[in-house]
Image (cartoon, grey):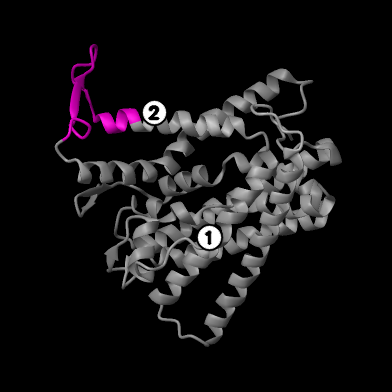
């Protein structure tokens, strides 16, 4: 049965939420995991993967309690990550946030990028039916999704290292052309997966800009809703505005061009993971939970949170430095639209 509230229809279940979360977590970062394990070694590589998984799981389950405020079961819904930040931290808070050693630091960023999850957690939770309480279901979703993802990541990272040794490229699908058909199938699978994942991450961006356009120019032709009937399926129609049709198209073209221009697959992954992991996955969820759970400053739990946050901040800074150092080194011989592994 569909759950409706605040004009929204919610049909999500434990299993659809898990599938959605798994799809959102697994992205292009996995292609750099064999290289990352190769840089860190057999012991440190899997250990770092498990550590990031544990940190992400813990911050995600406490963040699940921030979906409703002030009570995690009966409080008002925060439909998006931004809603939760504004509600719990107030309007002044926001998103603040080569050598072998540089490669090791950059590998930390790659693994952090692979575990980026918390920033889309509330969007998934907002699809769940209630009862039971969404936070309890979401904690199970997080356990299943991150658990399965961690096993998948460790297997991929270690098997890639076994197969290619220290010569494994930054993108495991690049650099080896002796089995064309297998690489082509793998690339096709990546494309199919990222088409869905692109929608998950881009929809909030589209929504913000389209809402602003409608608010700014509510009666303009740019905001007018047009309806087109499908020629062979008369029962269905397509509704769109020019802002959606044009701006979304321009956004996709622009981001694709930018992605093709940057030749540093590995270094870019490491930098993105580094700059997003601490603020989005650790600092903000913990800060919101401290407010939600009314944890007193100076208490043992508050001190534990500060130690965890500081540790992750150090990892973020080190990973960012390693990635920036690698980018600067690669820039010396960089060519636009030519990938450098």
Check residue 241 for magenta coloring. Answer: yes
Q: Position of residue 94 (x, y in %)?
A: 43, 63
Q: Return the disc, 2 or 1, that comes first in the chain's sequence.
A: 2
Q: Nearer the viewer, residue 296 or 269?
A: 269
Residue that sits furthest to the front in the current view: 332
Residues in magenta?
220-246
Q: Give the secondary structure at mark 2.
A: helix
Q: Which residue is mark 2?
A: 249
Q: Is residue 205 left or right of residue 283?
A: left
Residue that sits furthest to the bottom in the current view: 298
Q: Is residue 45 left or right of residue 271?
A: right
| Label 2: few (<14), some (14–19) or many (≥20) C-alpha neighbours in 10 Å | few
Check residue 20 for magenta coloring. Answer: no
- The answer to whether any part of residue 75 appears in the image is yes
| Image-quadrant location for residue 266 | top right
> Which residue corresponds to the image point at 63% horizontal and 23% vertical from the top-left?
185
Q: Which residue is mark 1?
A: 281
């Amino acid at each position: 049965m569909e759950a409706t509230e605040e004009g929204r229809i919610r049909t999500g279940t434990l299993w659809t939420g898990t599938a959605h979360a798994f799809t959102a977590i697994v992205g292009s970062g996995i292609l750099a995991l064999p290289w990352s394990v190769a840089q860190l070694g057999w012991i440190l590589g899997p250990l770092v993967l498990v550590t990031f998984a544990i940190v992400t799981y813990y911050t995600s389950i406490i963040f699940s309690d921030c979906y409703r405020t002030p009570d995690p079961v009966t409080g008002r819904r925060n439909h998006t990550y931004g809603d939760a930040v504004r509600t719990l931290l107030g309007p002044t808070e926001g998103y603040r946030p080569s050598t072998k050693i540089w490669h090791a630091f950059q590998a930390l960023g790659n693994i952090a990028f692979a575990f980026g999850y918390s920033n889309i957690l509330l969007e998934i939770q907002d699809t769940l039916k209630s009862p039971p309480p969404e936070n309890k279901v979401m904690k199970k979703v997080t356990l299943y999704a991150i658990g399965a993802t961690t096993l998948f990541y460790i297997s991929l990272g270690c098997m890639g290292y076994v197969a290619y040794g220290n010569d494994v490229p930054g993108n495991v699908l690049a650099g080896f052309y002796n089995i064309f058909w297998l690489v082509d199938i793998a690339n096709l699978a990546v494309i199919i997966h990222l088409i869905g994942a692109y929608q998950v991450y881009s929809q909030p961006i589209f929504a913000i800009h389209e809402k602003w356009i409608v608010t700014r120019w509510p009666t303009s032709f740019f905001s007018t809703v047009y309806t087109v009937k499908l020629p062979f399926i008369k029962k269905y129609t397509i509704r769109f505005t020019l802002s959606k049709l044009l701006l979304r198209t321009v956004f996709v073209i622009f981001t694709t061009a930018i992605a093709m221009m940057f030749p540093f697959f590995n270094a870019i992954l490491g930098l993105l993971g580094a700059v997003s992991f601490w603020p989005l996955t650790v600092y903000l969820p913990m800060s919101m939970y401290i407010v939600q759970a009314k944890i007193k400053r100076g208490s043992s739990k508050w001190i534990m949170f500060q130690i965890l946050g500081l540790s992750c901040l150090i990892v973020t800074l080190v990973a960012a430095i390693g990635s920036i150092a690698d980018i600067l080194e690669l820039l010396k011989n960089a060519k636009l639209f030519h990938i450098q592994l």
